Amino acid sequence: MEPVIPLGGRVSGPRLAVLLGSWRQGGSRQGAADLAAAIELQVLDGQLPLGTRLPAERELADALGASRTLIGAALDRLRENGFVASRRGAGSWITAPGRRRRDTAVPDGADLIDFAHASPPAPPGMIAAVDAARATLVDHLGQHGYQDRGLPVLREKIARRYTERGLPTTAAQIMVTNGAHHAFVLVLRMLTGPGDRVLVEQPTYPNALEAVRAAHAIPVPVALDPAGTRGWDIAGIDAALRQASPRLAYLVVDFQNPTGLRLDAEGRERLGAVLARARTPVVVDETLVELDLEGDPLTGPPPLAAFAGDLAISVGSASKSHWGGLRLGWIRASEDLLGRLISARYAVDLGSPVFEQVVFSELLEADGWAALARRREELRGNRDALAAAVSRHLPDWTFTPPKGGLSLWCRIPEPVSSRLAVASASHGLQVTPGSRFGVHGGMERWIRLPFSLPPAKLDEAVRRLSAAAASVRGTPASLDAPLA
């Protein structure tokens, strides 16, 4: 019985070429295998949803600069592995892989380990906060429920935290959003248009890159140096601001995702001066600022906004510090800019859910931000456990243990990050390759490993990753290793 073609959009040849990035790894003889592996990765990573129609062979060949013979061979591999289905006259589309090949199958009972999401579980006080919120919610039920800026009590608590960190802030400078990513998208919609440039770090948060592209803007990368003493190339940022004239910058200066780097106070002062001189607004993503694993967030360097002034638009989130299920974030900016943002927001949504805001406010009411000390201690143990596991199972990988955040940024000996991500799925492991963090792909010698899982799970994840790495290198003995 022929499969039913599911409903789905179509990806064009040029768009697919951008998604695949530098897909060719093994030279002309392995071109079909490289292309098939790169497309499989995009399917496993959710970038090519089920039902997505693929471009015709001729269109894809033109977009990738490859022969139709190579394209056809890659599609044959994808059909064999169950990632693509085709029908004469209807083309090809993405489908769910049916059965895995026998030599790389995950044994029955082996759970899939999510080694891609850098997000911790909810903190212990969540249920108590929900219970308390039920009583507090009564005060809001007689109102219309629309809060374009957010609940005043929650905005006051967020503003107080900024003041404690060295950036005097009032509740009037805070707007609650549906996460930090939502906050960034709102700013993008207001300050940029099609064809505008947005300066970003290289590597950077993949979803931020997707948001820039969705706004039809152009990301302009400035490379970070993960092994450097500071990481940020201030002179390079200055040059990019002068030469590219971006309308906006997006920076993560506190435990940068994915490198874990943190810019010191001196660097922030220099960076703030560079941004001020260019008059370039900057979105400062502070999602990870509370996850300082070596100290207290209040004793860290002041927010970048303390040096960049009203040009800095700080965005934060409860997702990494507390729980992603709350889907709450915020923007800290000047009152004038917030007023403009609220007007722009009406085209997207009409405010964040009241109940979640009440729950988060109750979480902060219980013991402020002090409860995060326990979370930081737990994550510090996870980080050390992951570092030990990588050193034990993958001794030729290198990394610098981050002083905060949620992940290790590992350098691998060979440029096989994308292949490794595909191979890991066959070992019961979901992992994100380095190419997702690059503006134009690449980053094939890097991979991000989160440490939000418990230590025992982290060790098992790295053991599976080691087996996948051995299979990519062509070491068949690793495939016989049983999965716990």
Image (tube, helix red, strand yellow):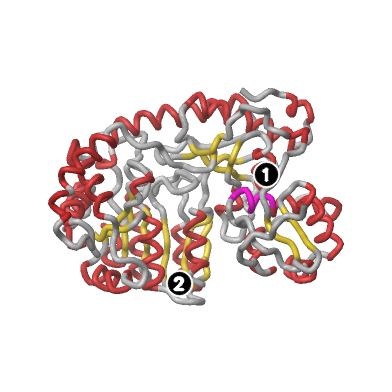
Residue 131 as seen in the image, left or right of residue 396: left
Q: Quarter of the image containing the C terminus?
A: top right
Q: Position of residue 297 (x, y in %)?
A: 29, 41
Residue pointed to by mark 1: 422
Using the rendered image of the protein, determine whether residue 203 is visible from the camera's viewpoint. yes
Where is residue 300 shown, x and y percent of the image?
29, 43
Q: Nearer the viewer, residue 233 or 443?
A: 443
Our reading of the magenta stretch's main secondary structure is: helix
* Cβ atoms at labels 2 and 1 below 8 Å apart: no
Q: Quadrant of residue 367?
A: top left
Residue 461 in the image, given as x and y percentages of width and height: 57, 31
- Residue stretch in magenta: 40-45
* Badge 2 density bin: few <14, some 14–19, many ≥20, Cα 10 Å: many
Q: Amino acid at mark 1?
A: Val
Q: Rounded to the nearest whole Å, what is the CA distance between mark 2 and mark 1?
A: 35 Å
Residue 31 in sight here: no
Q: Does residue 97 sit above or below 186 in this rendering? A: above
Side of 470 relative to 295 (left or right): right
Foreground pick, 133 / 21: 133
Identify the residue shown where x is 14% and y is 58%.
Answer: 142
Task: Give the number of callouts.
Answer: 2
175 to 100, vertically: above or below = below
